Amino acid sequence: KNQVEQSPQSLIILEGKNCTLQCNYTVSPFSNLRWYKQDTGRGPVSLTIMTFSENTKSNGRYTATLDADTKQSSLHITASQLSDSASYICVVSAKAAGNKLTFGGGTRVLVKP
Amino acid sequence: DTGVSQDPRHKITKRGQNVTFRCDPISEHNRLYWYRQTLGQGPEFLTYFQNEAQLEKSRLLSDRFSAERPKGSFSTLEIQRTEQGDSAMYLCASSPQAGVGTEAFFGQGTRLTVV
């Protein structure tokens, strides 16, 4: 069964600090992995998308890594800001089944001043 | 706004009533997805369309749920005889023809509350 597991479920960090979120997946055959940011009550917004051959991709203060061999990804947030408070969802796409997206449960990040 | 549009944004209904939600995808996108998200959880796949063809339905989509995309453009999701467990955010996403780096864009969702 295709699954995406994220850790931690939630975390609290102080403004200006860094944090790293983890994502493990069993989706196969792998097509791509995305990290989305979802503000409360709103739809997810894409941060990064990574294919099999990409190890690292950055989007401003967000840096995603991918190890396709171990089927692990991480999202690193640098110098956190209050606006980073949101849920971060790891989403993996399988080549079969119409590129259907399998979502992780998300990590809820709260940045405190 | 040329993004994915969902209507209504919020819906409160009494248990047993029928509700219908609409999703207007980005105009060139031929794939359309419906997801359900309960509080504190990630979205769960419900169904998806390639143009007007419904290609896959999740087992989450019981007989009370039906989705259509009659002309391959907008889509509707209908829930009949709503139950309190149907309370959730219903998200719609669209994407171009599938490719390795294909991006999916989400609407703002319809929040359903069944009382």
Image (cartoon, coloured by chain):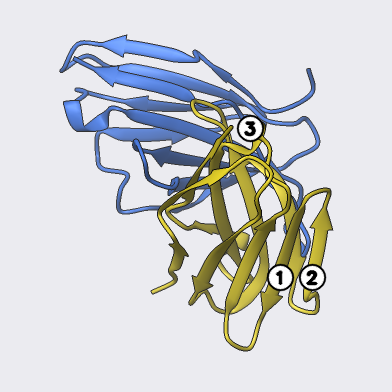
The CA span between labels 3 and 1 is: 23 Å
The label shown at residue A65 is 1
Chain under disc 2: A
| Residue farthest to the bottom, as pictured | A69
Dividing the image into 4 quarters, which one contains the C terminus of chain B? top left
Residue bearing mark 2: A56
Please tell me whether residue A89 is drawn above or below residue B113 in the rendered image.
below
Q: Earlier in the sequence, mark 1 or mark 2?
A: 2
The CA span between labels 2 and 3 is: 25 Å
Q: Are marks 3 and 1 on the same chain?
A: yes
Chain under disc 3: A
| Amino acid type, mark 1 | Thr
| Amino acid type, mark 3 | Leu
**Which chain is painted in blue?**
B
The CA span between labels 1 and 2 is: 4 Å
| Amino acid type, mark 2 | Thr
Quarter-wise, where is residue B99 in the image? bottom right
